[in-house]
Amino acid sequence: MTKAILIRGGSVIDGTGAPPVRTSILVRGETIAALGEAAEAEAARASGLETVDATGCTVMPGLIDAHCHLAFDDAASNAEIFHQRRNALSALVAAYNAGKLIRAGVTGILDPDSTFENMIDLRDAIEAGVARGPRMACGAYALITGVGGTAGRLIADEGITGYYMCVSGRDEIVREVRRQVKVGADWIKVHVTGIIPRQAHRGELCVWTMDELKLICDTAHALDTPVMGHCRGAQATRMAAEAGFDLIFHATAMDDAALQAVIDRKIPIAPALTFQANMVDFGDRLGTAPELIRLFEREITDSVDTITAAHRAGVPILCGSEAGFSMVPYGAWHYREMEVFVRYFGMTPLEAIRCATMEGARALRMEGRVGAIAPGMLADLICVSGAVERDVTILGRPGAVRRVMIGGVWQDLSPLPPRRPIPGWRLASMGRTLTREIAFGEEAAAEPFVAEELH
Ligand SMILES: [Zn+2]
């Protein structure tokens, strides 16, 4: 008989939005076998039982980060990702960074796109037990048109640039979607919107035709593969929804038509506003200009009414951190989208926790199998010191995540070995411009930090 683990004395948040209850959890093999009295009774009959005292802890499903770029290694610019990275080494570095996620209580991620589409390899390595990390669902290269995405002219007119694949015409679209499915993509990622440098004042624009978006969805769906899209702006969000997309990232600035299109189809949204929230709260520490900080805050506040309306109408809202960029480094901020949902969207902490757990299972394509604490579910859970239902930011406090279990196996939370710089890995920079004012001025004029809208 497989080994059993009894976790008792903890305050259990099941991930459905229900309030916590003090109950016992029996894990047998990789699944949750029983709760409460049934768990105690079964434990009494089990041989070789491991008992864990979770008194003073919240026991809850592990966090599922629905937007985490594990290949990017906390890059400070797109140029760094596009030009400084190597295939095998970035996969190895990602395997190291996966350890930070586990230590932060993350037990599952959706990695939307990666350099060399190599997070498919890390996913397979983790599943095979040769690397340690959270459960992963992966996209391959993000599909883009020749117009480009948010990196302007850095993106080549054809072929691969970093994590992008530029496709042109129906044949190329069909061929690339089928190729990605063949190499192991769980999702097809589409960069639906981009910034056209000379039309930047219009914000991000849809860079595809409706026919093209439908073609992507039809081709992917025929192979049982869902489609996810980076969409900023009303038109792009509506078009993606009507074309058949299965998950929408950002969905900022929706109008009534876009909102209705999303609500009609109950398409999950991952706003991924942690980047902006970090800028709002901590941008001044990085020297960000106040007007830029206000711009980032408006991106959050402009979404409040529409995302709240979608949530009330039953649209699943998922938590995604956009980790992988220097503004959102691995291991530090995965909980923070919940804080954004509570602070700006008026969710209760329990509602926000549901977004990061039970709803997050959709990102992994594992609904009903992970993301909740109930008999029959895979045992992906964490023990956190403190009452998380009162304050989700507890999850971000160093040392608060006491235990992490994935598939019934306790994970090693001992500190990761320190990491040293890798030659040629980061984009070289000469730093600030040496103006006459800085050289000879009365006081060194602080140059405002300009954040690039990376992804
Ligand atoms: Zn992203």
Image (cartoon, rainbow, N blue to C red):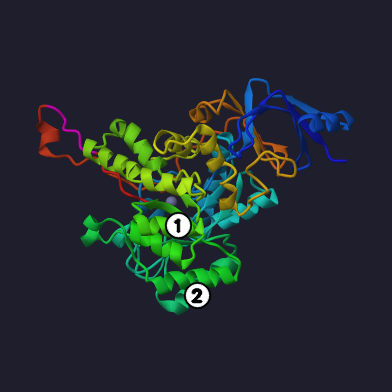
Identified at 37% across, 38% down, the residue is 277
Residue 116 seen by the camera: yes
Query: Where does the image place residue 342, in percent across and percent down from the top left?
Result: 45, 34
Residue 115 seen by the camera: no
Q: Earlier in the sequence, mark 2 or mark 1?
A: 2
Q: Secondary structure at mark 2?
A: helix
Disc 2 marks which amino acid? Answer: Val
Q: Nearer the viewer, residue 188 or 312?
A: 312
Instruction: Say above or below: 174 vs 233.
Output: below
Query: Where does the image place residue 290, in percent across and percent down from the top left?
Result: 23, 35
The dominant secondary structure in magenta is loop
Is residue 62 on the magenta stretch?
no
Query: Where does the image place residue 333, in percent across and percent down from the top left?
Result: 46, 36
Mark whose residue sits in front, 2 or 1: 1
Residue where numbered disc 2 is placed: 174
Disc 1 marks which amino acid? Answer: Val
Q: Which residues are magenta?
A: 443-448
Instruction: Say above or below: 384 vs 250.
Output: above
Is residue 444 on the magenta stretch?
yes
Q: Nearer the viewer, residue 448 or 226?
A: 226
Q: Among all residues in the image, which is located at the extreme bottom?
A: 171
Q: Among all residues in the image, which is located at the extreme top?
A: 56
Q: Residues within 10 Å of mark 2 (few under 14, many from 20)?
A: some
Residue where numbered disc 1 is placed: 262
Q: Nearer the viewer, residue 272 or 428?
A: 272
Identified at 72% across, 27% down, the residue is 23
